[in-house]
Each structure stands twice: as C-alpha cells, then as structure tokens.
C-alpha cells in the first residue's frame, strides 16, 4: 500500500492502444478542478518519435501537459525508463542491455506522491505487461495500492478482455473505482456491449467517450482533445 494518503488512481486498459493516455489526461484535468497540484506518472514507456523536432514519448507529453506540478517539466521525473522501440518493455530492455529496476519505478512514484495533492498513474499496455522476469504492471498496481480505473477499448472481444482484467484487479485485493468505455472505432452493437458490461462489471461506468475525429485523435493529445474527453467522463465518487 502507498505511504501517502493523497488522492490518486491507477489507470489500466483491456489492451494497448485503447485510450489509457487519453483517459489519464482527462482525469488529471478533472482533478485540477479540486486540487492545486496534480501530476501524471508512468513507470516505463516504450516508443519514441519526433515531436516538435525532439525525440519524445507521446504518452509522457500528454501526461506532462495535463499536470500542474513543476516536476512534470522534466519528463524523467514522471517516468524513470523511456525506451526507444514500441514493444513490450521487458523485451526492449533486454535487447538493449537495459536492466529495469523495479524499486526505481516505485521510488519515482513515491517521491512525486509526497509532493502533490493528486496523482494519476498510467499503466503499461494491458494489466499484466511484464517489466522483467519477476515483476509486471499488475505488481506495480498492487504495490502502490491506488484505486484502479479500467479503460475498455470498445471493439470486438472487449467483453472478455474487460472481465478478465476486472478479475485480475479484484484478485489482487485492489479497488476497482470504475471503468470508462472508450469508442476506438466502429463497432457492431456498441450500446448493447456497453449495457452488457454495465451488468457484468460491479463498478460504476464513469462515462463513454465517443469516437474522436481525426484531428482530436492525433497523439500526443492536445488540451482540446483532453477537454473533449473530460466532457464525457466523471471522477469516481
């Protein structure tokens, strides 16, 4: 369990590319309405591209944009490991001879959590993405002990993915604070799928984000994109 008592959430998803960063940024904006100092954190990212002429990670640019604490001005404060290749972190690290230190990931979170009023931790890929041989993203979620918010990417197969993730979250003694339905593309019986998930997941639906237009969906997300997501979701009670 975390040593601080600040407000915070761990955001996980049914898979990679389902909108965890969009929801994490939107949650940070919602928290800004209640708290002065908020910040995003991610234990490790994999994938760097040229953004404004500099090699950066899109997720971290978005988290920094939505944070108010000055520590977010230095990306290394909100993510201790930034890997170049977009793939599973443990594989990229091994290929590049990088030893991912789990304690360093936890320490990075704890340092920030003690300085802010609220923190949003974005997980890596799905809930159980490996960090190295012995630790994964689910272990990190359990060790920091924050309530979990699940982002369900609304596409074929999402019900199974969502229920397995919920089972994994609850099985670790964590609180599922709620879930967000993120419409990531056209889907048959979208409303019916959401209704089924509402019946099957014993946690509140915090909102449904419609499919964003091409401009808003571009990453790293703009402030307008995050504000658009904010208009469709709420914080857990």
Image (cartoon, rainbow, N blue to C red):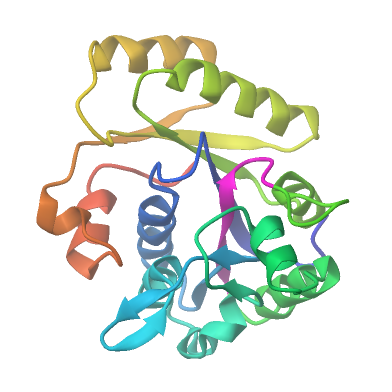
Residue drawn at x 27%, y 33% as measured from the top left: 183
Q: Which image quadrant is residue 93 in?
A: bottom right
Residue 128 on the magenta segment = yes
Is residue 22 depicted above or below 117 in this figure? above
Is residue 101 depicted above or below 186 in this figure? below
Percent from the top left, x then y, of residue 30?
37, 59
Is residue 123 depicted above or below 79 in this figure? above
Q: Is residue 153 left or right of residue 38?
A: left
Q: Is residue 140 left or right of residue 220?
A: right
Percent from the top left, x then y, of residue 185?
23, 32
Q: Is residue 103 visible?
A: yes
Spot the residue most to the right. 134
Percent from the top left, x then y, of residue 53?
28, 88
Q: Is residue 131 left or right of residue 48?
A: right
**Nearest the camera: 101 or 174?**
101
**Quadrant in the picture for the N terminus:** bottom right
Percent from the top left, x then y, of residue 173?
80, 34
Residue drawn at x 69%, y 23% as measured from the top left: 167
Residue drawn at x 65%, y 66% as measured from the top left: 43
**Nearest the camera: 170 or 123?**
123
**Nearest the camera: 208 or 152?**
152
Looking at the magenta stretch, what is its main secondary structure? strand
Residue drawn at x 28%, y 63% as measured from the top left: 219
The mark tally for this picture is 0
Q: Is residue 202 visible?
A: no
Q: Magenta residues? A: 117-129
């Amino acid at each position: 369990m975390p040593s601080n008592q600040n407000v915070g959430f761990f955001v996980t998803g049914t898979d990679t590319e389902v909108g965890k960063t969009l929801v994490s940024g939107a949650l940070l904006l919602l928290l800004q309405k209640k708290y002065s100092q908020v910040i995003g954190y991610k234990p490790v990212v994999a994938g760097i591209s040229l953004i404004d002429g500099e090699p950066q990670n899109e997720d971290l640019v978005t988290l920094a944009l939505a944070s108010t604490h000055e520590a977010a001005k230095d990306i290394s404060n909100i993510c201790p490991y930034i890997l170049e290749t977009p793939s599973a972190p443990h594989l990229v690290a091994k290929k590049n001879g990088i030893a991912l230190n789990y304690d360093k990931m936890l320490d990075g979170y704890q340092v920030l959590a003690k300085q802010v009023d609220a923190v949003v931790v974005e997980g890596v890929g799905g809930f159980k993405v490996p960090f190295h041989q012995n630790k994964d993203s689910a272990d990190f979620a359990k060790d920091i002990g924050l309530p979990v918010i699940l982002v369900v990417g609304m596409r074929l197969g999402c019900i199974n993915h969502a229920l397995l993730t919920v089972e994994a979250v609850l099985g670790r003694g964590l609180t599922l604070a709620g879930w967000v339905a993120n419409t990531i593309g056209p889907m048959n019986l979208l409303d019916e799928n959401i209704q089924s998930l509402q019946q099957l997941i014993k946690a509140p639906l915090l909102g449904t984000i419609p499919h964003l237009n091409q401009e808003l969906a571009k990453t790293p997300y703009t402030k307008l994109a995050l504000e658009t997501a904010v208009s469709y979701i709420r914080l857990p009670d």
